[in-house]
Amino acid sequence: MTSTTLAMQGNRQPVAELPSTRGDVQRLRALLERGLPLTSRPWQTLAEQCGMSEAEVLALVEHWQADGLIKRLGLVVKHRPLGIRANAMVVWDVPDDQVAALGRRLAAESAVTLCYRRPRRLPEWPYNLFCMIHGTRRPRVLSELDAIVARQGLEQVPHRVLFSTRAYRQHGARYLGE
Amino acid sequence: MSAPMAKHDIADLDVLDRRIINRLQDGLPVVEAPFAAVADELAIDEQVLLERLKALKENGVLSRFGPMYHAERLGGGLTLAAMAIPEARFDEIVERVNTFPEVAHNYRREHRLNMWFVLATETPERIAEVIAAIEADTGYPVYNMPKQEEFHVRLHLPV
């Protein structure tokens, strides 16, 4: 963690200022990335695997969560076994001065699972606001989208729906090696 | 249904599986015995919760249980990229693109830009290098569309 990120967080004191280059700290991150062990004391299990104490591991994880390094601790569901087959990327061409406001409104829609501003790539790609809508079937997703367009008054905003027709690779991003 | 589950089978989830998934999508408390705490909330045994989670993992419903890292805070690079690949060459090119370990997801989508993938790299500088390498290897341009602003949603998929 850098002092810059601390400064951005205000005056909160670091609870576990361990250098991120320390071998056992790196090992803990790598192990965590593969997932939390499904044991009664998962932090203890991890602690044993990287030569720390359970308290140390808990303090580090709390610290990383407070600092924003870990966005969320939870489970990742795979869509296809749950019958969620329709995966629509809906892209919008919004005037630059309106994109933040519309992004916030779309993100508040319960059907929207991700919402980002991204750069246009003209002339090939004029869209600058991206959101994802998932559902069991295409007609369901399209009717959700129709409802959003009507509720938010977006009839005049150019947009396109890009359904995925095949997932060629679907593994979680790996940011750290072992 | 025999394991491993066939690609197009839909998992057979009962009410308890659904309660567990819906509860845990909201996160796990950072305490010494987190599964016991969640089992308590759900009014079930900790052992039952752990067994259900193991089964959900084995039959492919859960891909992972753990932290979602903030890639940029870790010092890594993350972006969404797209390519326009002629139909006749799509399968060949997607294989080439997927040989790059930095490609985390790769979807075919209905548009002239028909290949969409996420790149995750150990450093931000590495994104440009990987994109240049993919362009050199395939002969097609890569459109890089990194996130400029994230609008926060409640990440929850009711099952």
Image: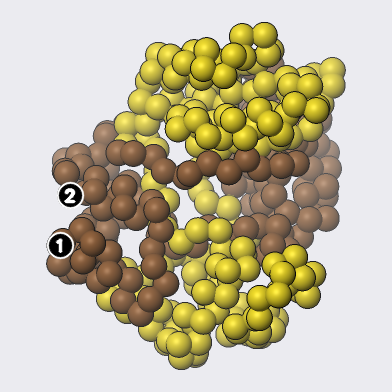
In the rendered image of the structure, the colour used to display chain A is yellow
Q: Quadrant of residue B6?
A: top left
Q: Is residue A123 above or below residue A44?
A: above
Count how many numbered circles sit on residues in the image. 2
Q: Which element type, helix, strand or loop, lies under badge 1?
A: loop
Amino acid type shown at disc 2: Leu
Mark 1 → mark 2, Cα distance in angstroms = 9 Å
Residue matched to label 2: B16
Residue at screen point 48% across, 44% down:
B154
| Scheme by which the image is coloured | by chain
Chain given the colour brown: B
Q: Amino acid at mark 1?
A: Ile
Judging from the image, mark 1 belongs to the subunit labelled B
- Which residue in the protein does label 1 denote? B44
Q: Answer yes or no: do the residues labelled 1 and 2 have beta carbons within 8 Å?
A: yes
Residue for point 37% across, 35% down: A80
